[in-house]
Image: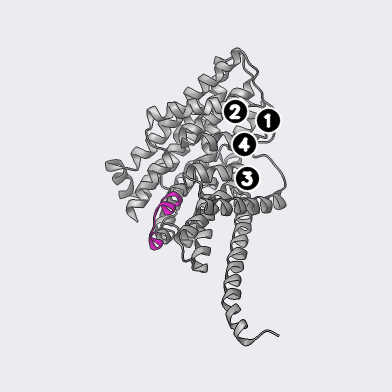
């Protein structure tokens, strides 16, 4: 028989084991919740985009009023009720990971901001602003995981940091249905390293979030299945052309956002945020009307059609979409740049097809998408994996690698700092 003394000695061990299992169950539940939330956010975003298109078709001129009103109202809501919800969300997550003060992290990733991010990003898409839901999904997911870490009272800050990284990775995986991209994004963009303790959490959260997304919406590719290929020969000239053009354009986009976040420009934009958003909203609405509504929203449908070879875009779509995405971000409304950047990149690739007649048009479009996206985020591996998983295309692995490398080198000649890391510095200083 067990003595009372032995039971007393085992009780602490049993307690420790119970706490470990509680942490694991809470973490697994959080990852599943991230998957469900990402799917729900995607559905809301699609409905908001469909509503905007419906309004434009039946009440075309209403967008000239709706877009500025939504931009101004969204910025007012964010500042008044949901502080910390502005912008993409990824810079806030990077800043939170790099800080060592739990109180500062809580200020950067408050629960209320996550609610606001979901609500106001959806509102912005209904208003036709050129924003995406992927960056906000990263912030919301990381905030959820950070809240779980606080609830569990994890004594080690490294474990709490790992939870935030895992949440961000799961957010990307579930948002795009790209599990491998979620892991790569965590390594290359969020943590900039792959610690042993972090790796298990990242992989587990990505798997659970991905399985949850798969169970709800099924196995799908974000942009459908693309079978574009590129044989050896003169067609490889498109790798150089798209890499340089996409890297340069993406670098210019990032440099504009970084410059606008600093110094005098940032002060003027922040002095009257609602008025600034209203003015930018008017410009976005006018450009949207001039482009027959094509520049409104994420641009996802347009990129999908161009990739599928079902459409060719007018020459002005690329610069117009570029401009409205810059204006949408600078307006201060919560929203990301992932989806709009992929659309801009597809438009750039479509433009460049005329310069490389020896390459299949679909291939040039796909390479243009990867090149521009790499130029914006300066994370070539993430760009390659995301584009490959979103199009279910592995035939272009080598051309994508070469294009992304050229794009990164070109982007750095224009913009010395990676976009999200540079924007994160401001949040670190404010915290």
C-beta proximity under 8 Å, tags 4 and 3: no
- From the image, state whether disc 4 or disc 1 is nearer to you: 1
Q: Secondary structure at mark 3?
A: helix
Please give the residue where the numbered disc 1 appears in the rendered image.
Answer: 226
Q: In front: 32, or 64?
A: 32
Residue 312 spot, x, y in % from top left: 61, 24
> What is the x, y in percent for residue 387?
60, 34
**Residue furthest toward the bottom?**
4
Magenta stretch, main secondary structure, is: helix
- Decide whether residue 65 is among the magenta residues: no
Cα–Cα span, label 2 and label 3: 20 Å
SS type, badge 1: loop
Can residue 246 be seen here?
Answer: no
From the top left corner, tell me how far across and down residue 255 is, in percent: 38, 34
Q: CA distance from mark 4 to mark 3?
A: 22 Å
- The CA span between labels 3 and 1 is 18 Å
Q: Which residues are magenta?
A: 93-104
Q: Name the front one of labels 3 and 1.
A: 3
Which dot, 4 or 2, sits closer to the camera? Answer: 2
Q: Earlier in the sequence, mark 4 or mark 3?
A: 3
**Residue 171, percent across and down?**
57, 50
| Front residue of 258 and 335 | 258
Q: Is 39 placed left or right of 76 in the picture?
A: right
Q: Is residue 13 left or right of residue 290?
A: right
Looking at the image, do the residues carrying marks 4 and 2 touch, with CB atoms under 8 Å apart?
no
Name the residue tied to disc 4.
301
Answer yes or no: do the residues labelled 2 and 1 have beta carbons within 8 Å?
yes
């Amino acid at each position: 028989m067990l003595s009372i003394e032995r039971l007393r000695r085992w009780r602490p061990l049993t307690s420790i084991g119970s706490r470990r299992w509680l942490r694991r169950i809470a973490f697994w539940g959080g990852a599943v919740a991230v998957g469900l939330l990402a799917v729900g956010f995607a559905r809301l975003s699609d409905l908001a985009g469909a509503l905007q298109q419906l309004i434009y078709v039946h009440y075309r001129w209403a967008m000239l009023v709706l877009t500025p009103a939504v931009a101004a109202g969204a910025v007012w809501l964010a500042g008044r009720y949901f502080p910390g919800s502005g912008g993409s969300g990824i810079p806030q997550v990077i800043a939170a990971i790099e800080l060592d003060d739990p109180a500062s992290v809580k200020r950067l990733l408050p629960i209320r901001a996550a609610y606001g991010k979901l609500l106001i990003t959806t509102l912005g898409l209904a208003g036709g602003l050129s924003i995406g839901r992927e960056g906000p999904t990263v912030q919301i997911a990381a905030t959820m995981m950070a809240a779980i870490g606080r609830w569990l009272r994890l004594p080690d800050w490294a474990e709490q940091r790992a939870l935030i990284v895992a949440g961000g990775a799961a957010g990307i995986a579930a948002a795009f249905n790209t599990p491998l991209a979620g892991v790569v994004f965590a390594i290359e963009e969020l943590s900039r390293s792959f610690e042993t303790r972090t790796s298990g959490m990242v992989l587990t959260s990505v798997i659970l979030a991905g399985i949850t997304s798969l169970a709800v919406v099924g196995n799908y590719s974000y942009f459908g299945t693309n079978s574009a290929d590129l044989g050896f020969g003169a067609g490889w000239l498109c790798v150089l052309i798209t890499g340089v053009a996409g890297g340069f354009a993406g670098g210019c986009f990032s440099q504009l956002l970084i410059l606008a976040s600093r110094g005098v420009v940032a002060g003027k934009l922040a002095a009257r945020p609602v008025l600034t958003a209203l003015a930018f909203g008017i410009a976005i609405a006018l450009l949207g009307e001039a482009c027959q509504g094509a520049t409104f929203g994420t641009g996802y449908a347009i990129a999908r059609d161009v990739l599928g070879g079902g459409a060719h875009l007018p020459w002005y779509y690329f610069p117009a979409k570029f401009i409205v995405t810059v204006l949408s971000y600078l307006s201060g409304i919560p929203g990301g740049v992932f989806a709009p950047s992929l659309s801009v990149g597809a438009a750039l690739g479509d433009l460049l097809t005329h310069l490389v007649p020896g390459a299949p048009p679909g291939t040039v479009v796909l390479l243009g998408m990867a090149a521009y996206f790499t130029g914006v985020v300066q994370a070539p591996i993430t760009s390659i994996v995301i584009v490959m998983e979103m199009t279910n295309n592995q035939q272009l692995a080598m051309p994508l690698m070469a294009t992304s490398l050229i794009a990164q080198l070109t982007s750095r000649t224009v913009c010395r700092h990676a976009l999200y890391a540079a924007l994160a510095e401001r949040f670190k200083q404010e915290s």
